[in-house]
Every structure is written in structure tokens, then in C-alpha cells.
Image (cartoon, rainbow, N blue to C red):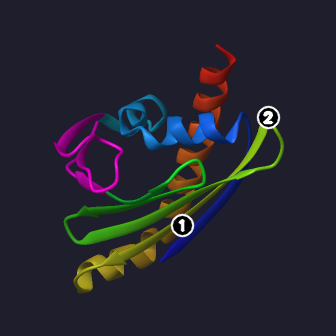
Amino acid sequence: MKSHVELDIHGRQEDLAQLFADPQNNPQWMDDIDHIEPLHGEPGDTGSVYRMVPKRGHMVFVATVVGRALPTRLQLLLKAQGVSMRATDTFLRLSERETKLISDEEFSFEGVVARITSWFGRWEMARAHRRHMEAFKRFAERQLQA
């Protein structure tokens, strides 16, 4: 299953990419994340691994930064029980103060039950993806205004 979100954000490409690439910021804009637990490396650097601990439920994702070419691109691989997700986030400079965020997520599911569940939940996953990207936009524009 794939999800694609594009948003124009008021802010410099470099500043937005830095805010997005720092996993310590995730709990400030992802409403379902309680905190980040570093597991290996400096969080956000290529090869680093960290745990995303949810506020509710038991779906803990372990994220690995597989590519980091800031200020243009960040690639993550997230894994939880029965599901993995590859995220590619691209920042395109539109002007000195405007940036387009292009976020692509591709989900893979293991096992028959997970695949069936994903088929029924694909719209919710796409809505959650858009909700997270819009929350990042609000967070980043607030941070850059301060």
C-alpha cells in the first residue's frame, strides 16, 4: 500500500529539513507519539536507529535512517510487528521562504491476517499520513515564526 502527500510550507528548505530530520521533534507534531528512545547512533543521522513509543496502544515502531541528503531528502525504514514502512520525504525549494514537502510512504505487511487488516485499514493509514504531514507543517511554521 502506498500513500503520497504534498504540502507547501512557509519556511526555508534548510530549516524545514532540519526540523523534520530530528526525531526528537516527532512527539511535538505527531499526536500519537509519546517519546523517542535512541537505540543506536546519533538520532537522525544515517544508520541511526530509534524506537517511536506511542501514547496509546502497543504498536511500537523501530525507525532506521537509511538515507539522509539534507536539505533535499530523508529516507526512513520503520518496522513493527507484522508491518514495515519505507518513508521518503523530499523538500523542494519553491522560493527563499517557501518549500514543497513531498512525502511518500510504502507499507508492507507480513502474514495473511496483517494483509487482510491492511486492506480494510488502507484509507485510515492514508488519512494518518496526511494528518501527520499537516501537523508537521503547523509545527514547523510555528517554530520558524518564533
Label 1, on which residue? 123
Residue extending farthest bottom: 112
Looking at the image, residue 92 lies above or below residue 30: below
Give the mark nearest the N terminus, 2 or 1.
2
Which residue does the numbered mark 2 point to in the structure image? 97
Q: Position of residue 83 (x, y in %)?
A: 28, 70
Distance Cα–Cα, label 2 vs label 1: 33 Å
Mark 1 crowdedness (10 Å alpha carbons): few <14, some 14-19, many ≥20: few
x and y percent of residue 87 in the render? Answer: 46, 63
Query: How many numbered badges does the structure rendering display?
Result: 2
59 w.r.t. 95: above or below: below
Q: Whole-percent x and y of residue 95?
A: 84, 43
| Magenta-tinted stretch | 35-64
Using the image as rendered, state which of residue 54 and residue 79 is in the foreground.
79
- Residue found 36% across the figure and 32% down from its top: 24
| Direction from residue 44 to residue 128 in the image, left or right | right
Q: Amino acid at mark 2?
A: Arg
Instruction: Point out residue 113 in the picture as x, y percentages from the top left corner.
Output: 25, 80
The residue lying at 44 percent from left, 68 percent from top is 121
User: Residue at point 79% right, 34% down?
Assistant: 97
Q: Nearer the viewer, mark 2 or mark 1?
A: 2
| Magenta stretch contains residue 11 | no
